[in-house]
Amino acid sequence: MKQIYFDHAATTPVDKKVLQEMMPYFNQNFGNASSIHSFGQEALLAVEKARMQVAKYFNANLNEIIFTSGATESNNLAIKGTDRAYFKKEKKKPHIITTTFEHHCVLETVKKMEKENLIEATFINPKKDGVIDVRDIKNAIKSNTILVSVMYVNNEIGTVQPISEIGRMIKSKNSEQGTGDKKIIFHTDATQAVAYFDCNVEKLGVDLMSMSAHKIYGPKGVGALYVKFGLDIAKIQDGGAQEFGLRAGTLNVPGIVGLGSAISMIRNQDSVNTKIRELRDYLVAKILKEIPDSRLNGSKIKRSPNNVNVNFSRVEGESLLMMLSAEGVFASTGSACSSGSLSPSHVLLSLGLKPEETHGSLRLTLGKNTTKKEIDYAVKAIKKSVEKLRKVSGNVLKDYYKNKS
Amino acid sequence: MYSKKVLEHFTRPHNQGVIKNPSGVGMVGNPTCGDMMKIYIKVKKDVKKREVISDIKFETLGCASAIATSSMITDLAKNKTLEEALKITRNDVAEALEGLPPIKMHCSNLAADSLREAVRDYRDKNKK
Ligand code: FES
């Protein structure tokens, strides 16, 4: 049976070359990068090479890259670390601004800190097209705001946020204040942006930036946090002095080597992205044309080249995924039934969609090896599955509304 | 993960569709959570004058498990007397499907509830 993977925003396969470069660090050069002997030094050398590769991609310095276990940890460190450092100094409750459609690892972190009374928080809603308005952020800034955290690309609907614009706004806010005053720190979760959008920290004007290796054909369980030099952030995990004292724990050497190798392989970004974008546009157009009562979620233009998120009315997403999986097409959904909590996707709700409008959502995310043939096959499978499920649901929805009115 | 039986009933549901001029109809669920089930029954008297579900059909908007439980409960209720049909519980449905993931047990509730609603609807209409 055909197996077509349309879930690259969930994770990607490790690239063959990346895997090759990682292999020796499992059982040949297996040293601990903190050891003084030559095994340890060899491992350290590999880690530092990876640090250079990441720093180069971000246009950052070597001492500004912290290796972590992935974007979840990077985001936790960025947010909690900023709060801790501020509280240690000021002994005051700070204010943090983020958005309602962040990834759970940002959202839950901020919500929990708010609940524990550590911070005040403001959650900004995106506009209907899934894009944050810089003015909304600006208006939310208070005298005790210490951190703004806005994701670069939304993981579900792929919409891209005006990060450099927000960066500029914060910079000018900061310069309005006297030199002694606290500055607003700007963090972005760039997990879905790396390889698709410019991640030059200088241009973006960010102080903190998170990423994960497994979204860019690297291994799972490793990521990085860019921490601007001189920024006051506290560690959140106790132990050894690894990673400039910011992240205790033996370094995941093979993983870090894999991350460095994966990020250094991002080349000819423009031409690869143009190819993916063209395929994506073809896929969206084909779905909207061939399947009635379908709709695209999120902006059509301000969108990651690899993301499609469509909604089919009178269909439930989990059953659609199951049906597609039986046809060999692997995708994802924001439907309530598919989530562990049985509540619909907070991202789709943040666009102002009603819960029943989030039901038949389907996310298809393309990769660098996606072909037109695969798209044609997938659309056929989607069409067939939607028709079948619509037959099964018949008129229930219509009847329900008729009974209610 | 779903059992083989669930997948069977999901991909090839039994008794799917509508009954024209049904004796009773039961609809449960609400579109907010996504589970919506409608069961149609046709009731006839058998030779012993007992009221029997001679035909049953369903329409369901919901997850794979909601569709599979609809299919299974229509199988279980077909040709049963109303008393027997009312005794079918969500556990009977789940068991016949060789188990459901814990988080999906509520879908089988819907199936049992909509069948009960259909029977009640029939009895309401036929009250003398
Ligand atoms: S219909 Fe929502 S979980 Fe089954």
Image: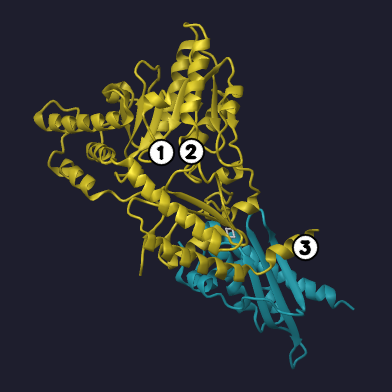
The residue mark sitting in front, 3 or 2, is 2
User: Disc number at residue A193?
Assistant: 1
Q: Quadrant of residue A234?
A: top left
Q: Is the residue B92 above or below the residue B78 in the image?
A: above
x, y (%) of residue A117? 57, 24
In the rendered image, is residue A325 in sight? Answer: yes
Circle 1/circle 2 CB separation < 8 Å: yes
- Give the amino acid at mark 3: Lys
Q: Are marks 3 and 1 on the same chain?
A: yes
Asked whether B55 or A123 is in front, the reply is A123
> In the figure, is residue A278 to the left or right of A272?
right
Asked whether B17 or A89 is in front, the reply is B17
Q: Are marks 1 and 2 on the same chain?
A: yes
Residue at point 33%, 27% (across, down): A247
How is the structure coloured here? by chain
x, y (%) of residue A107? 52, 35
Residue placed under numbered mark 3 in the picture: A402
Residue placed under numbered mark 2 in the picture: A160
- Give the amino acid at mark 1: Ala
